[in-house]
Structures are given as structure tokens and as C-alpha cells.
Image (tube, rainbow, N blue to C red):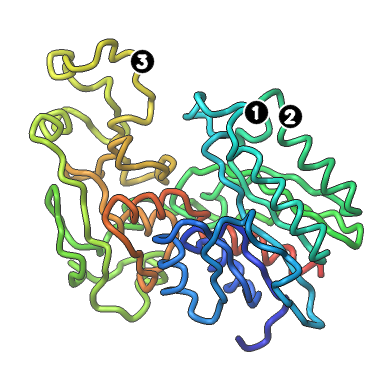
């Protein structure tokens, strides 16, 4: 990497959305750690110069990473957040073992002593168990001699066509406080702009590589597409016919409430459906959160089907050159779990500017 400005270590890297943002900000990510094999495979395919350690982080000694550099070092990542999510109340407690993996993140900070720390998570971290985990993280980082700058950022403010709120804790060993990155000026990128040139697909589409259907007609789509003439990820879950029948009744911006009650007879109490279920995206606005978009059955704004992997990746701000590995379900999970690269890039540029 030319003109590298810092060295990065990515913990709980997933497919690599946060690393991509870091690299775009001028950070050389030397090491990534990820326990999930398919996510690690995706990471390696797209980050060829980073050393991937595919293992449970609890098995890894931070002192063995051997990071030698005169540049600032940044330890970053997002400990598993499912237990802190507002859509998953069953596991948002102290008894969920995965909710304690942030302790491993703290251990790496203690042993490596980086110049900067960037921890990312869902906003629910601040409220889970009355803020127990959030306050514990802040206290532990503070005890290690770092100055914390917590902030909640909305991805659509930074060029991502998605209204996704994320919590970031940026910590400095040099007592530097960080202000949130300045939002981009002008209107926000819409779903229609993000998807304008991608292939037209059917329910259950399974041909991975396809040519674009049209020229990219806006700056965002051109940026995501680059010079490619074909893109991968044109894979769509196959929904049953009764599901497709429900889609017909849902207009843009509407959800399950628009479906006739007679077509929802398999729900014991359909009023308990989450507002994100059977949500058809609006072409002229940023998307709702792309999380578990297959389970929630997010609907394409114009076609009666779910989103393809590439469409979800575009909404997450992954460029089309970024390819996902594993079966369809694993690819969908990797996209949904990722930190939007453009959001991560904005955060890291702010850190670099303060270094």
C-alpha cells in the first residue's frame, strides 16, 4: 500500500467490511482474526495482503502477532453483537456467553497497547442490561489509559444508501478526544440509485455471474461498479408461492400490515410481527437496515422477490469487485453482519486526521 498512514489489526473481522473502510482511509491491515470459516474465506479472497487467523479469538495470544512498525497502530473490530440487538431480546443478557467476548477485545488492547482503538457495535449495546456491558467496556478501556470518544453514527450520513445506526467507541492512548466525522453534504443516496444497473432477477435466481442490465446513471453506482462489465452475487432465496402472493399486496415502504389477513393464516398472532418483516424497500429513499434480510424477507422495491446478495452488498456500500464465499445463506449472513465500508472509512479518516 502506497502512503500508508497506520497499521491495523481487525478483531472479529467477519467478511471484512471494516477492514475495507480502513484500507480506503490509508491503513495497512496486517492481521485479521475471524472464527467463522466462510467469513474468513471471503476476507482472504478480498484482502490478499492481510494475514488471516481463522480461529476462536480466545485461543490466540496477542503477543504472537509480532506487529513491528514505526507507524501508529489501530486495533479495531466489532465483538459479536447479536445479543445486543434490539431485534433479539432472547439473548440480550449476562448469561449469553457471546456477550462477553468484548473481554477478548480488551485483552488485545492491554497486550498490544495500540495508539488507537475503534470498537463498533449495535446501538443496543448501550442499553442492554441497563448499560452494563457498555459501561464495563468504557471503564476497562479507560483503566488501560485511553481517552474514550463514544458516538452513534447513521450510515446514510456518510454516503451509504441505508439508514443503519451504529455505535462506535474511539479511544486514544494520547488523550485525544475525537468528534464524529462530518456528514456528507447534499441529499442521501437512495435504493434506486444503488440498484439502477444491476441485473433483473427472478425468485430463486441462482446464476452467480451476470452482465449488468444498464449503464450506471449516478455517481454512487459508478463508484460501486468500477470498470466491471459483469458482477457476482446475483443469488436470491427461493420463496414459496404463498410468500410471493403476499408480496403482490405490499407497496414501497409498506410491510406485513398491507397483506390481507386471509393470506397470513399461518401466524397465530400476526400483530406481533416485527415492523421490518415483509418490508418493501422504497426506491427514492435510503434502505431500512440490511441485517438478516432473508429472515425478514425484505422485498425488492420493484420486483416481487427478495434481495440478491449483490443488491444487499450495494446497499451496504460494498463495491462490486468484492466477492462473497460460501453457500447462499452464508453469503447473506456475511453481508448483513458487515459494517458498511463507507461508514468505516469515514470513521478511520477521522482517526487518521487526528494522529
Residue 301's quadrant in the figure? top left
Query: In the current view of this chain or complex, which residue is farthest to the front?
Result: 59
Which of the labelled discs sits on residue 272, or is there none? Answer: 3
Identify the element where label 1 is drawn. loop
Which of the labelled discs sits on residue 24, or is there none? Answer: none
Identify the element where label 2 is drawn. helix
Instruction: State the separation of the CA atoms marked 2 and 1.
Output: 9 Å
Mark 2 sits on what residue? Answer: 132
User: Which residue shows up at 18% across the image and 70% down it?
Assistant: 210
Q: Is residue 41 left or right of residue 215?
A: right
Mark with earlier residue (2, 3): 2
Give percent across and percent down for residue 47: 49, 75
Give percent across and percent down for residue 206: 15, 58
Q: Are marks 2 and 1 in contact (CB under 8 Å)?
A: yes
Mark with earlier residue (1, 3): 1
- Up-down: is 242 above or below 239? above
Identify the element where label 3 is drawn. helix
Pointer 3 local density, CA inside 10 Å: few below 14, some 14–19, many at least 20: few
Nearer to us of marks 2 and 1 is 1
**Residue placed most toward the observer, 333 or 297:** 333
Give percent across and percent down for residue 243: 15, 32
Mark 1 sits on what residue? Answer: 94
Query: In the current view of this chain or complex, which residue is farthest to the bottom?
Result: 2
Amino acid at each position: 500500500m502506497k502512503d500508508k498512514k497506520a497499521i491495523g489489526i481487525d478483531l472479529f473481522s467477519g467478511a471484512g467490511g471494516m477492514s475495507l473502510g480502513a484500507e480506503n482511509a490509508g491503513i495497512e491491515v496486517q492481521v485479521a482474526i475471524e472464527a467463522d470459516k466462510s467469513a474468513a474465506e471471503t476476507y482472504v479472497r478480498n484482502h490478499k495482503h492481510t494475514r488471516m487467523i481463522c480461529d476462536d479469538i480466545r485461543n490466540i495470544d496477542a503477543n504472537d502477532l509480532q506487529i513491528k512498525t514505526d507507524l501508529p497502530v489501530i486495533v479495531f473490530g466489532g465483538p459479536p453483537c447479536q445479543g445486543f440487538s434490539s431485534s433479539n431480546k432472547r439473548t440480550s443478557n449476562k448469561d449469553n456467553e457471546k456477550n462477553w467476548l468484548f473481554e477478548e477485545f480488551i485483552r488485545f488492547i492491554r497486550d498490544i497497547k495500540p495508539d488507537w482503538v475503534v470498537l463498533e457495535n449495535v446501538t443496543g449495546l448501550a442499553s442492554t442490561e441497563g448499560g452494563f456491558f457498555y459501561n464495563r467496556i468504557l471503564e476497562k478501556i479507560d483503566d488501560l489509559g485511553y481517552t474514550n470518544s463514544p458516538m452513534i453514527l447513521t450510515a446514510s450520513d456518510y454516503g451509504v444508501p441505508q439508514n443503519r445506526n451504529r455505535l462506535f467507541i474511539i479511544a486514544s492512548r494520547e488523550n485525544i478526544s475525537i468528534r464524529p466525522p462530518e456528514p456528507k453534504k447534499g441529499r442521501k443516496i437512495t435504493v434506486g440509485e444503488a440498484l439502477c444497473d444491476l441485473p433483473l432477477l427472478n425468485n430463486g435466481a441462482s446464476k452467480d455471474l451476470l452482465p449488468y442490465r444498464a449503464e450506471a446513471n449516478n455517481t454512487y453506482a459508478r463508484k460501486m461498479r468500477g470498470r466491471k462489465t459483469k458482477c457476482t452475487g446475483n443469488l436470491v432465496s427461493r420463496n414459496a408461492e404463498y410468500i410471493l402472493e403476499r408480496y403482490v399486496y405490499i407497496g414501497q415502504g409498506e410491510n406485513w400490515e398491507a397483506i390481507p389477513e386471509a393470506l397470513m393464516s399461518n401466524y397465530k398472532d400476526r400483530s406481533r410481527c416485527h415492523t421490518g418483516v415483509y418490508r418493501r424497500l422504497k426506491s427514492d429513499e435510503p434502505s431500512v437496515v440490511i441485517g438478516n434480510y432473508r429472515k425478514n424477507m425484505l422485498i425488492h422495491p420493484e420486483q416481487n422477490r427478495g434481495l440478491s446478495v449483490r443488491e444487499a452488498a450495494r446497499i451496504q456500500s460494498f463495491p462490486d469487485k468484492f466477492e462473497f464465499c460460501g453457500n447462499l445463506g452464508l453469503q447473506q449472513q456475511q453481508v448483513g453482519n458487515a459494517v458498511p465500508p463507507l461508514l468505516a472509512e469515514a470513521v478511520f479518516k477521522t482517526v487518521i486526521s487526528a494522529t
